[in-house]
Amino acid sequence: MKPEILLLEPMMPEIEQQLDAAYTVHRHTPSATLAATLGDAAGRIRAVATGGGTGVPDAVMDILPALGLIAINGIGTDAVNLDLARQRKVHVTTTPGVLTDDVADMAMGLILSLLRGLPAGDRYVRAGEWGKAPGPTLGRKVAGRKLGILGRGHVGQAIARRAGAFGMPVAYTDLRDLNLEGYRFIPDLAALAADSSILVVAASGGAGSRHLVSRQVLDALGADGFLINVARGSVVDEQALSSALEAGTLGGAGLDVFEHEPVVPESLRTSPRTVLQPHRASATVETRLAMGDLVVRNLAAYFAGQTLPTPVI
């Protein structure tokens, strides 16, 4: 008999075909209860495949007594209780490396879209207003603008490399000075924001980083400053961000992630100072296939009793 797994988030069709070939897959949809999804299979589920945003809630782990692996299709682990997983001796894997370039590309795309007003120009042309109505307001120059990065992991470093092509001086903050040649380390986040024209959030989520981008940090970034978030919505105080945008004390925000996804505050959805995406920085065919392949490999290794390719715990 095939091993039984629980799939909490859809994956690429090619990846799901591989899962179906190797396992009995119980697919959970938001419209169904987990009890309805699993029926009498809860005690036989040995692995869960999920996304970084969905993770595996404690209540789900609690009803899966045979659980041994959580395979995350992403790099975030903040939606999984790692302490509980360790206590239960449940392995957790992610898909590192393969999505770095796409997330960094999204950060640069949000910068260009926000500062150059690309969405407004697109709407203007599509509406047939070109030559008939005043055009969108002038954008802001991107090249040479000072960039600050919160979090200098793989994604942060990839963003810095791309910023170099735009002649942007780059400074960063992290838990420690990484002694990166050509990049200034500023230990205080508010000081980094005050020194930057654009602040990019590329830090991990979780309790330790919740609301690191506070009202104080947004005030330091200022009315001519711009915030970009391609990390986790929880890193930014969303209420403070909404207030700053409404008051005009922040120049604008480009956001791929939100604090309570998929719920996005109306103030952010209607603001002329925002460019928004539905958490899709890694959403390219190539990267989603590569991520899915890592999920498949981690599952196969676990069930074969082999070393996991990309373990977190």
Image: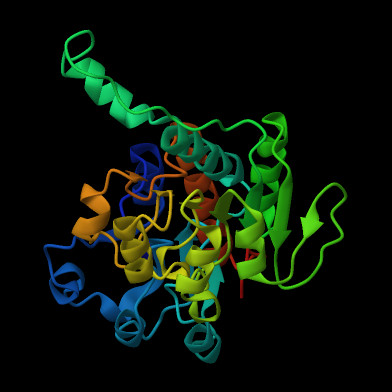
Residue 82 picture location, percent across and down: 52, 81
Please state which of residues 295 and 273 is positioned toward the viewer in this rendering: 273
What residue appears at the point 12 percent right and 71 percent down from the top-left corner? Answer: 36
The extreme bottom residue here reads 87
**For residue 258, above or below residue 65:** above
Kindly tell me whether residue 309 is visible in this rendering: no
Residue 141 picture location, percent across and down: 55, 30
Quadrant housing residue 307: bottom right
Kindly tell me whether residue 280 is visible in this rendering: yes
- Looking at the image, residue 27 sits to the left or right of residue 171; the answer is left
- Looking at the image, residue 26 sits to the left or right of residue 209; the answer is left
Residue 46 picture location, percent across and down: 41, 73
Please state which of residues 192 and 305 is positioned toward the viewer in this rendering: 192
Q: Quadrant of the C terminus?
A: bottom right
The extreme top residue here reads 131
**For residue 68, above or below residue 127:** below
Residue 262 picture location, percent across and down: 25, 59
What residue appears at the point 37 percent right and 50 percent down from the top-left corner? Answer: 279
- Looking at the image, residue 184 sits to the left or right of residue 114; the answer is right
